Amino acid sequence: MKGFTNNFKYLYFSQLFANTSDNIYIIALIAYLYELTHSIQLSALVPIFITSAYFISGFIAPIIYSRFQKQYILVFNQTMKCALLIILIGIMYVELHYIYILGLAFMIAFLDGFTNPLSNTLIPYFESKDNILRANGKISSMNNMIQISAWALGSLLLAFLHSDGLIMFCVILSIISVIFMMKINFNINTVESEHISSKSFKAVIKSNRTSYSQYLNWNTFIASFGHAVWIAAIMIAFVKEYLNAPSFWFGIINAAFFVGLLVGSKMIHLIQRFNMMHFYYSGYMLLSLITFVFGINRWLILAVLLSWLYGIIEQLLSISLHTEIQKHLNHETLLDTYTLNQSIYSLGFCLSKFVMSLLAEHATLTFSFVVASLAYLLICLLTYRYKNIF
């Protein structure tokens, strides 16, 4: 963490413990629902409820941001999440109907819907423009490490602590997150000196008329159709039916993707040598090619290699794009952009997951990968349309 401000370090560790808690609690929730109902379909409702909550909170977030200080929102929401997790343990203990479990999952994700965009806007406050790229890489690398390790750690702890004990562990992680959050000094660099008038979600949409905001939001929506083929449901079926391999190969391919994300985080300084427009154009062209070749490929080793390459390029594109957005938008517009972007991401996630699953089931798995590769080509055209901002 050398070279970063203390505020960034507190934000980093706060997000580290909060995100670890979020990932592990979902494992506990899915395991408990399956044990309670013995239904895979009901267990799969957890991510759907969570994504829906993100989408809905986006409509209310602008009002919250205009009336309360950033630190109050972050600390209050994380504290309320602790309380909701404790209530969740109580519901598990008395074995209430599963709808209460899903309702609490929705409420916890609803609170996250306010904190996630806010956290993304704080990096430009705490770090200089020259250090934003490195800071984004650090945060992204941490998030990737959590995604790799949290599921393994959560599954291991689940065997010893069971679902209720695992959620209590998440409560402890959330409390530590709040402690780090309270250490952040928000009275610097106009973090709390800016006055934001009360605004509606309609006003937030109007605020997203800048070229940078439009590019990010269109990019997010279109890219969701490219990402959708890499989700577990489609990938597991592809490994079994097209690669004729045991299920554990899905884990290997998935691990290669996450390793690629980590490698991409370490390589992020290299993109400063390139023209951004050329970098994005060629990057999404490569993602299109990788996705297409993966869909027609029948060799296991090549599938692992392609997944690894996909992870590297995806990470480089994601970090560099968010860095450009944070450098060129003022703080109020940046907050509006991330608020709307989260809603678009949630909508795109649900819609693309449904469409791609439909294509995979009623057409072929290979055809769904071809459509996904076309989505990345569409982003190339989008990049050319907005070439003036790079």
Image (cartoon, helix red, strand yellow):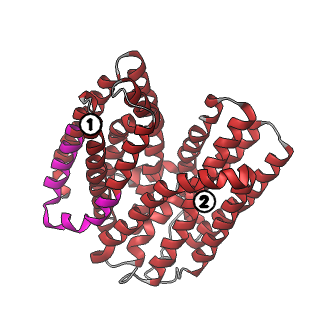
Tell me where residue 102 sits by quadrant. Answer: top right
- Point out residue 129 in the picture as x, y percentages from the top left corner: 29, 75
- The magenta stretch is 262-289
Which quadrant holds residue 335?
A: bottom left
179 versus 106 height, above or below: below
Tell me the residue that label 2 is attached to: 21
> Which badge, 1 or 2, is on the more N-terminal residue?
2
Label 2 secondary element: helix
Give x and y (percent) for residue 302. Answer: 24, 39
Q: CA distance from mark 1 to mark 2?
A: 32 Å
- Amino acid beneath label 2: Ser
> Any mark on residue 388, and which?
none
Quarter of the picture containing the C terminus is: bottom left
Q: Quadrant of the N terminus?
A: bottom left
What secondary structure is found at the residue carrying circle 1?
helix
Which residue is denoted by mark 1 in the rendering?
Answer: 291
Q: Amino acid at mark 1?
A: Thr
Q: Is residue 328 visible?
A: no
User: Is 122 drawn above or below residue 186 in the view shown?
Assistant: above
Magenta residue check for 33: no
Give the left or right position of residue 317, taking residue 200 as reference.
left
Overall secondary structure of the magenta stretch?
helix
**What's the residue at 68%, 59% (across, down)?**
81
Q: Nearer the viewer, residue 221 or 147?
A: 147
15 lies left or right of 365: right
Residue 346, position as x, y percentages in the image:
48, 43
